[in-house]
Image: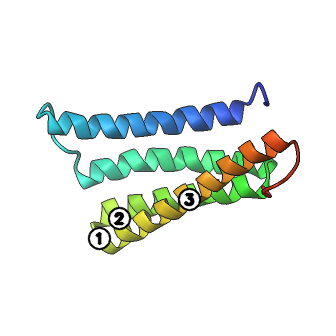
Amino acid sequence: MEKNNMFGTVAFSSYGFFWIILVCNIIIQKLGWGEAPTPVAMGWFLSAWGVLSLILFICTLKHGIAMQILFGMVVVLFFLLVAGNFSGNKTIHVMGGAEGIMCGSFAIYCAAAHLINDAFKKTILPL
């Protein structure tokens, strides 16, 4: 297992916090402790994560093609979600949802490839 992996640490902890923040926002609304953010507020929130994703994508240019594809997909995902929130266009939101499913599926492939290749100490699934 690789140690001192700054990229992995930043990526996984950042996106972990993204999901924690998003879920806490939903829970706070359900408990009646706050209101849902406006679409514009959500657009700005997602924009910040899109910028981080773009920075991480640039970092993947020093990694394998699978990581470049994955983080490129994440940048497109955030762009679609931001555009959907700012425009109010439901079609763009649906496109973002479809991109999110593809992105998640490819992330599972990448995780499986890393685990399987490491377990067998050779390339079984290409990255």
Q: Quadrant of the N terminus?
A: top right
Using the image, tell me which numbered label, if any, was put on residue 55.
none
Looking at the image, tell me whether mark 1 or mark 3 is earlier in sequence order. Answer: 1
Neighbours of disc 1 within 10 Å: few (<14), some (14-19), many (20+): few
Using the image, tell me which numbered label, if any, was put on residue 84.
2
Residue at image point 67% right, 49% down: 112
Q: CA distance from mark 2 to mark 3?
A: 22 Å
Q: Which residue is mark 3?
A: 105
- The answer to which quarter of the image holds residue 127 is bottom right
Q: Position of residue 123 (x, y in %)?
A: 85, 52
The residue most toward the front is 120
Q: Which residue is mark 1?
A: 90
Looking at the image, tell me whether mark 2 or mark 3 is earlier in sequence order. Answer: 2
Q: Nearer the viewer, mark 1 or mark 3?
A: 3
Label 1 SS:
helix
Label 3 SS:
helix
Query: Is residue 17 found left or right of 53 in the rendered image?
Result: left
Callout 1, which amino acid?
Lys
Query: Is residue 105 found left or right of 84 in the rendered image?
Result: right
Query: Is residue 44 found left or right of 68 in the rendered image?
Result: left
Q: CA distance from mark 2 to mark 1?
A: 7 Å
In this rendered view, identify the residue nearer to me: 19 or 60.
19
Callout 3, which amino acid?
Ser
Is label 2 in contact with label 1 (beta carbons under 8 Å)? yes
Callout 2, which amino acid?
Gly
Residue at image point 38% right, 45% down: 45
